[in-house]
Amino acid sequence: MSPTATATITFGDELRRWREARRLSQLALASEADVSQRHLSFLENGKSKPSREMVLHLGRSLDLSLRDQNALLTAAGFSPEYAERGLDDPDLDEVRHTLEAVLAAHGHIPAYVIDRGWDLVMANPAAIGLSALAGIAPPLDVAANVMRTCFHPDGIRANVVDWERFATALIHRLEREMVHRPFDDRLAELLAEARSYPGVAELPERAPLPTGNDLMLPMQVRTDHGVLRFISMIATIGEPFDVTLEELRIETLLPADRFTEDALRSVT
């Protein structure tokens, strides 16, 4: 083998890596997948070759994303099961139009679509307008990354009230995503970037619990109209059979009080 050659990752290697990442013993995964521990052991050490159906069954038992199920199939020598197409693909015209209609239906409430790496894919006029009110210049566009916008010194952070608590919650959100997607290089790079910005390394290990009547952690943004308070809600597409669609999320910034709602109505 030449110095630049790399070892081929086998299906057994991938299966073991995911099982250990999910903190499952062979017995626990065998029980979850309703297969014998002996057969699972043979699959991991290469003594048995899985069928395509078994690979998909184990991927679902491990709660893998469609992207990671495709990778598991590839390691086993099979072609991917799920397509991955951009939203500009003609086959996704109906989905794109549906997302546009959902964003438009929010009216004066900011809403936007992000992908698995928190890149902004689509946004309604209210979200673009809010980014301008919050001091982001230029305002958000489809080239923006939402996490970078929150953490970068030139982003929204200067106008976020109690930015330390807000940023701590965001870092923890990224860390929770890394637990579920431990081998996602794109997400790992984003988390490392967020941690590299000034003041982030000094954030507390856990976010303080909300106080008073705040049952959820609000985002509070200083604007020329006063301090606007929002609660974030994230929705996903149910039962997708396309990698791109599974990774899209619609985030809505709901007004947390009447003052914020009235301010949004006055500027949209």
Image: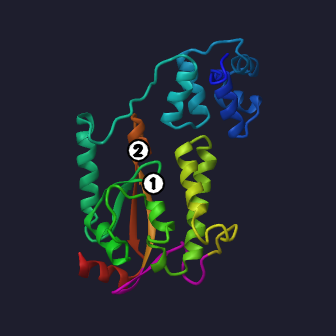
Q: Nearer the viewer, residue 249 or 77?
A: 77
Left or right of residue 32, residue 71 in this image: left
Q: Which residues are magenta?
A: 210-228
Measured as percent of width and height from the top left, residue 201 is found at 66, 67
Tell me if 186 is positioned left or right of 110 in this view: right
Residue type pointed to by label 2: Gly
Q: Compare residues 201 and 242 and report the one nearer the observer.
A: 201
Q: Is residue 29 above or below residue 257?
A: above
Give the number of the disc on residue 118: 1
Is residue 223 found left or right of 169 in the rendered image?
Answer: left
Counting from the top left corner in percent of width and height, residue 242 is at 39, 35
Taking depth in this image into account, of 150 and 228 the one nearest to the observer is 150
Q: Which mark is residue 238?
A: 2
* Front position in the image: 159 or 109: 159
The answer to which quarter of the image holds residue 266 is bottom left
Percent coordinates x, y for residue 180 in the rendering: 60, 46
Q: Position of residue 161 (x, y in %)?
A: 50, 81
Q: Residue 211 in magenta?
A: yes
Element at badge 2?
loop
In 3D space, how far apart are the residues under numbered discs 2 and 1 (Cα atoms)? 19 Å
Name the residue located 39 percent from the left edge and 70 percent from the top edge. Answer: 254
Q: Which quadrant is the C terminus positioned in?
A: bottom left
Give the number of the mark in front: 2 or 1. Answer: 1
Q: Residue at x 58, y 49 (%)?
A: 188
Image point 70% across, 15% down: which residue?
46
Q: Secondary structure at mark 1?
A: loop
